[in-house]
């Protein structure tokens, strides 16, 4: 019925479309997975037909043009705000992930530019997958009234929205992020609550790929045929922007006077953002990491796998963004 667990990206589309409310989400290793209550399931396979991991109609989810790639000054959060403000100024709304105090990431509908600063762009978004909740439904309700909507998310969640909608809306603009993977919130919560003296020495890269959701290592959205009209990402000296559709071109025109852009070719982009083109490689120690975590707990895996890296620096960096 639903896709295999290792392929499930946790987008929540199956739950959103189920007419029997037979699907709930359960946590496994800090990631959300659907669970079906077969006592009320009607076995109509609506969930399977729209499952984002199965990509039943990937072609309609893709935005169209060959991407035009740029480097920009300032970070991706600033770039995102420029696009979002334009939509809000025209009376539209924005749906984007926000990190809450309990460390969960949820999709909020934003109607006021003052709320844009709460949106998780860059670090936090790259790390933690958002909970779609009723966001897809609210987006459809909004689009059905004819209002403009900007939806911002990692590419798999943009694909999730497009699967859920199953039709093109002229007033929908989508921005996806250059995404390496979604990390386990369970391990992160242990990190936050632990008092280890070694936090400073943890290496971000090692930690992040060890912590990723299984499906991220075979992400079908890490490719230049982007699912969003626009793609945003950060790089060492600024931000990266890719314009992937006619809507994306028009949106960029509206803010171009506020930007200094340098054109990039594919080779330059690949050096700056390899995850624009391909999925993160699965670290050989990932299974051992989670097995040790389940058996011995956080401090054990920190000591064994993480102390050579800069975890605290990494997560501190996220909250600065
Ligand atoms: S098969 Fe139909 S009723 Fe059963 S979980 Fe899927 S969508 Fe819901
Ligand atoms: S629709 Fe999304 S959450 Fe549901 S099974 Fe497919 S990938 Fe997983
Ligand atoms: S790597 Fe792919 S599957 Fe994983 S969170 Fe990012 S977009 Fe989704």
Image (tube, grey):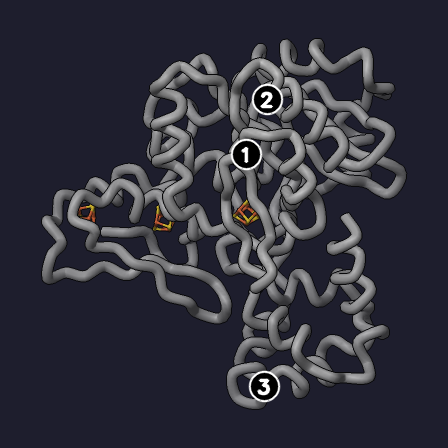
Which residue is under mark 3? 297
**Residue 211 as seen in the image, left or right of residue 200:** left
**Residue 145 as seen in the image, left or right of residue 206:** left
Label 1 crowd bin: few (<14), some (14–19), many (20+), radius 10 Å: many
Which residue is under mark 1? 110
Q: How many marks?
A: 3
Which of the labelled discs sits on residue 88, or is there none?
2
* Residue 66 shows in the view: no
Which residue is depicted at the point 20% across and 54% down? Answer: 22
Please tell me whether mark 1 sits on a helix, a strand or a loop.
strand
Question: Which residue of the protein is positioned furthest toward the right in this rendering?
Answer: 237
* Residue 286 shows in the view: yes
Precedes in sequence: disc 2 or disc 1: 2
Precedes in sequence: disc 3 or disc 2: 2
Camera-nearest label, 3 or 1: 1
* Vertical order, 142 against 270 (above or below): above
Residue 93: x and y, percent? 52, 26
Which residue is depicted at the point 21% across and 51% down? Answer: 21
Q: Marks 3 and 2, how far apart in space?
A: 46 Å
Residue 203: x and y, percent? 80, 67
Label 2 crowd bin: few (<14), some (14–19), many (20+), radius 10 Å: some
């Amino acid at each position: 019925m639903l896709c295999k667990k290792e392929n499930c990206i946790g987008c929540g589309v199956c739950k959103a479309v189920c007419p029997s409310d037979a699907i709930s989400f359960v946590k496994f290793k800090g990631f959300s997975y659907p669970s079906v209550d077969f006592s009320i399931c009607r076995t109509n396979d609506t969930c399977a037909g729209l499952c984002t991991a199965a990509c039943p109609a990937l072609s309609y989810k893709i935005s169209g043009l060959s991407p035009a790639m740029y480097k920009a000054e300032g970070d991706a959060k600033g770039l995102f705000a420029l696009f979002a403000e334009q939509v809000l100024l025209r009376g539209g709304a924005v749906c984007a992930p926000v990190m809450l105090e309990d460390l969960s990431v949820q999709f909020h509908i934003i109607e006021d530019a003052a709320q844009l600063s709460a949106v998780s762009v860059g670090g936090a978004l790259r790390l933690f997958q958002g909970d779609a909740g009723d966001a897809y439904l609210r987006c459809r309700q909004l689009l059905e009234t004819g209002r403009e909507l900007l939806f911002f998310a990692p590419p798999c969640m943009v694909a999730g929205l497009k699967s859920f909608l199953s039709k093109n809306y002229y007033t929908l603009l989508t921005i996806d992020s250059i995404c390496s993977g979604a990390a386990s919130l369970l391990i992160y919560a242990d990190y936050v609550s632990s008092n280890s003296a070694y936090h400073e020495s943890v290496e971000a890269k090692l930690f992040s790929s060890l912590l990723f959701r299984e499906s991220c290592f075979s992400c079908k959205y890490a490719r230049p045929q982007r699912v969003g009209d626009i793609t945003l990402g950060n790089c060492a000296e600024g931000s990266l922007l890719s314009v992937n559709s006619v809507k994306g071109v028009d949106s960029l025109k509206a803010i171009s006077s506020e930007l200094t852009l340098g054109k990039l070719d594919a080779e330059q982009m690949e050096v700056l953002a390899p995850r624009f083109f391909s999925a993160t490689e699965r670290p050989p120690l990932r299974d051992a990491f989670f097995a040790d975590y389940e058996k011995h707990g956080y401090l054990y895996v920190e000591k064994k796998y993480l102390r050579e890296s800069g975890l605290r620096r990494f997560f501190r960096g996220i909250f600065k963004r």
